[in-house]
Image: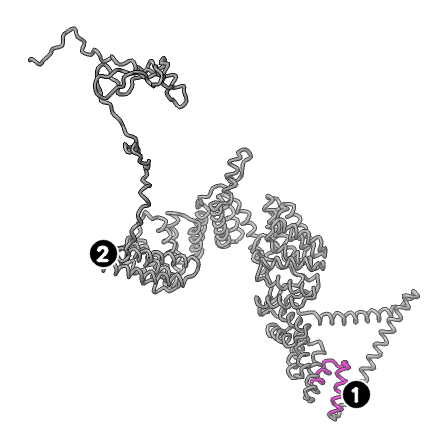
Amino acid sequence: MENVHLVPEDEDLYSGYNDYNPTFDSEELENDVGFQQAVRTSHGRRPPMTAKFPGTAIGARPLATSFGPRIPMTSSMGRPVTGAVQDGAARPMTAVRAAGYTSSLTRGSTFDPLGQSRGPAPALESKNEDTPEEKIKILEKKVNDLIEESCMAQSMGALQLALEKAKEAGRKERALVRQREQSGNGDHINLDLTYSVLLNLANQYENNEMYPEALNSYQVIVKNKMFSNAGRLKVNMANIYFKQKNYPKAIKFYRMALDQISNAHKEMRIKIMQNIGVIFVRMGQYSDAITSFGHIMSESPNVKTGFNLILCYYAIGDREMMKKSFQNLISVPLGVDDEDKYIPSNDDTNSNMVIEAIKNDKLHQMERDLKSLAEKFIMTAAKLIAPSIEASFAAGFDWCVDMVKSSQYVELANDLEINKAITYLRQKDFNQAVETLKTFEKKDSRVKSAAATNLSFLYFLEKDYDQADRYSDLAMNADRYNPAALINKGNTVFIRHDYEKAAEFYKEALRNDSSCTEALYNLGLSYKKLNRLDEALDCFLKLHAILRNSAQVMYQLAQVYELLEDPHQAIEWLMQVISVIPTDPKVLAKLGDLHDGEGDKSQAFQCYYESFRYFPSNIDVIEWLGAYYIETQFCEKAIQYFERATLIQPTQVKWQLMVASCYRRSGNYQKALDTYKDIHRKFPENVECLRFLVRLCTDMGLKEVQEYATRLKKVEKMKEIREQRVKSGREGSARSRREGREGSAGSADSSHSSNSTKGERLSAKMRSLPASNEPYEASNQKELDASYMDPLGPQMERPKTGAKRRVEEDDFADEELGDDLLPE
C-alpha cells in the first residue's frame, strides 16, 4: 500500500493533455510571418539567418550538444531547431549519413558511388557444350528450326523440300530421345515436340499425295495415349480416305472423330457432319445426306448446307421439301451489317473519316463475299427447282420470286425475272423472252437498263438493227454509265458503217469501265476499218496484255501487221495463235499464204497440208496443194485434191478438166481419154474438153476423132453466133437509146446477156469465196455475225462439223448482263 497513490478528488484526471508547444499550432500558421515569408519565396527556401555580431553566423549563442541541458533555440520562422531541449526533457541528437558520403571523404578519397574505379567487370564464363544438358538443348533447337523450315517451304509451294525437312526433323527428334535416355532423363521427354514432329511429317506426306505414309504417321499419333486430343486427327485420316474415294472408311473415321469431340466444340462437329453429308451425296445415298444436312440446318444453319439440302431433295424429286428447304435457305441469317452504315453523313467529319477507312477493309470485303456467295446459291437453287416445283417453269419462277420478295434478298427478285427470260431463250422461245424483258421497262432504272441491254442484244442477233438501236438508247437513258448499253449502241452504229461514231461509244464505255475487254476489242476493229492501223495495233496490244491466250486478239494483231506490210510479225502472231488452237484450219491456211508470199514453199506446203487435214473442204487450200504437186512434177498426187474439189463443186468443169490434165501429164492417156469423155457427156458445149478429145484421139489413132472434130466445129460455130447476137443486141440497145426508138428485141437480148454476164461474175465470186462454215472469214460486211464476249475473253464460234472456226475478220462483240445469253 505504500506504493499506491490515490488521486485527490479535486484533481482533474485529464489535465495537461491540451497543453502543447505553440510552435506546433497549425491554426496559427496563417499569422506566422516567417512561415508565410518562406512559402512566398522561390522553391520554399528559408530566408538567410542574420548574425547579431560581425564575423559570425549565429552570434555568441551557445551550440546545442547531444548531452547535457539544452537551451531552446528557435528558427527565424519560430520553429524549434532539431535537437532543442524543451521543458527540460533531454533527447539524444541523431544524424543520417547521406548515400555516397563517408568520413574518408575528408581524407582525400574521390566520390565514386557506382564503383567505376574498380575497372570493367570480368568476362562471362563460357558454357560448356559438352554437358548432356547442353547437347539436349541444342538438339531441341535444331528440331524446332527444322519444323519451322518445313512449314515455310510448304507455304511457298516447295512440297518436296518441306517433306525432306520434316523427315530430317523426325530423325533429329529420335536422336534427342536417345540422348535423354543415355543421360538418365528418359522420364523428361518433351511430348509436345514429339507430337509436332509427327504431325508435321504426316501433313507433308499428305501434301505430297503419299497417302499410305500419311495414314501410318497419323496412326502413330492416334494410338499413343500420352498425346491429349489426338482423336481429332481422325478427321485428317478421313479426309485422306475421301481423297482416295474410299467413302465407307471416310464416314467411319468421321464418326469416330465425332465420338471423341465434345459438344463444346460445336463448330467442328458441324463441319464434320457437313463432310459426312457430302460423302453420302457422292455415294448416291441422298436420304442419309438429307439426315446430316437437316441436323446441321436445325443446329447451326448456313447457306452452303441449305443449298446442299435443296440439291438432295431435287435428286429424290420431293417438291414440297424443295419448297420448304428454299424457304429455309433464304431465311438463313448472314450476320452481315447493313450497307447503309458505310454511307458517309454530311455533318460529322470524324465519322466520315472512319467510314472511309473501313469501307474497303478486309472485314467489309469478307461481308461482301459472304453476301455474294449467298446470292449465288439462292439464284442457282431458284433456277434449279423452278421447273420442278410447279407444273410449268414459269409458275415455278413466279413462286420463287414471291418467296424472295418477302425475304432479306428483295433485290434478287428482278434478277430472277431476268433469268426467267433467259430460260425462255434456252428453250428457243424468243417471243416469251422478249415479252418478259419488256415488262421491266416501267421498273427502276437499274433493272430497266439490264432488261433493255438484253433486248438490244437479242434484236442485234436477229439482225433487227432498228429495234436493237431503240433498246440500246433506252438502256443508256436509264443508266448512262452502263458499259454494256454503250457497247450495244456502238455495235448498231458500227453495222451502219459509221465507224467514227462507233469508236466514240466504245471509248465512252471504256471510260466508265476501264476493264471492259469487249469495248477495247470493238474499238480496235473500228480503228482498223478507219485505216488507223497504229491506233488499232495499240488497242489489240493492250487487250493482249489482259487476255494473254485469246486467239481472237492474236489473230487481229497478225492481220494488222499484215496490213502494215510487216509479214514477219504477222507470221509470229499467227504462230502464237497456232500454239493456242493448233487445229484451226483457216489460221493454218493464212500462215501458209504468208509463207508462200515470202517464198518459203516448204513451210507453206506444211501449213496448207495441215489445214487440209483438219478441214478438207476449203477450195483455196485444195487448189494450192494441187498446183504445188503439179509444179513439183507429182501429178499423180495432185489428182486426189482435184477429185475432192470436184465433189465439193460438181458444177464447176475446171476441176474435172484438171483431173484429166493430170492423167494426161502423167502419161495415163487412156484414163485421161475416159475422163474427157465423161466431162463431154456432162458438159457437151465445153470447147476446151472437145479440143483435148480431138487431140488425144488423133495421137492415139482412134476413129472417134472425126466425130469429135465435127462436134467441135459445131460448138465453136454456135459460140460465134451467140457472141454475134450478144454484140448486135448491145449495139441495137445503144442505138435505141441514142435515137429514142423502140428496141424491145434488142433490149431483151441485152438483158439476157447482162444477166448471163452477171451470173458468170457471181459464179466466179462464189468460187473465190470460202464455204459458209469456214472460220475466220467474212464474205461481205452485211454478213457479219455478232459474237458475244464473256468477261473471261472473246468467244470463238465453231461449225457443227467439228472443224475449228475463227472469229470473222470484221467480227465484233456484243455485251449483255449475264453469261446465260451466250449463244449456244
Residue 344 point in image, percent of width and height: 54, 38
**Mark 1 burial class by Cα count in 10 Å: few <14, some 14-19, many 20+:** some
Q: Which residues are magenta?
A: 675-699
Residue 615 point in image, percent of width and height: 61, 72
In reply to whether residue 567 is colored magenta, the answer given is no
Report the front residue among 169 and 305.
Answer: 169
Report the front residue among 602 and 793.
Answer: 602
Q: Quadrant of the N terminus?
A: top left
Q: Are marks 2 and 1 in contact (CB under 8 Å)?
A: no
Q: Quadrant of the C terminus?
A: bottom right
**Dot label at residue 185:** 2
Tell me if 711 is positioned left or right of 644 in this view. right
**Dot label at residue 709:** 1
Q: Secondary structure at mark 1?
A: helix
Tell me if 80 is positioned left or right of 629 in this view. left
| Residue found at the far left of this picture | 1
> Residue shown at 29%/55% (left/top)?
137
At label 1, the amino acid type is Ala
Report the front residue among 688 and 319.
Answer: 688
In reply to whether residue 680 is colored magenta, the answer given is yes
At label 2, the amino acid type is Asn
Mark nearest the camera among 2 and 1 is 2
Residue 636 point in image, percent of width and height: 65, 84
Which of the 4 image quarters holds residue 313?
Answer: bottom left
Which of the 4 image quarters holds residue 608?
Answer: bottom right
> Residue shown at 68%/59% (left/top)?
534
| Residue found at the far front of this picture | 55
Tell me if 395 is positioned left or right of 158 in this view. right
Q: Does label 2 or label 1 sit earlier along the sequence?
A: 2
> Residue shown at 62%/59% (left/top)?
541
Note whether residue 211 is visible: yes
| Residue found at the far top of this picture | 10
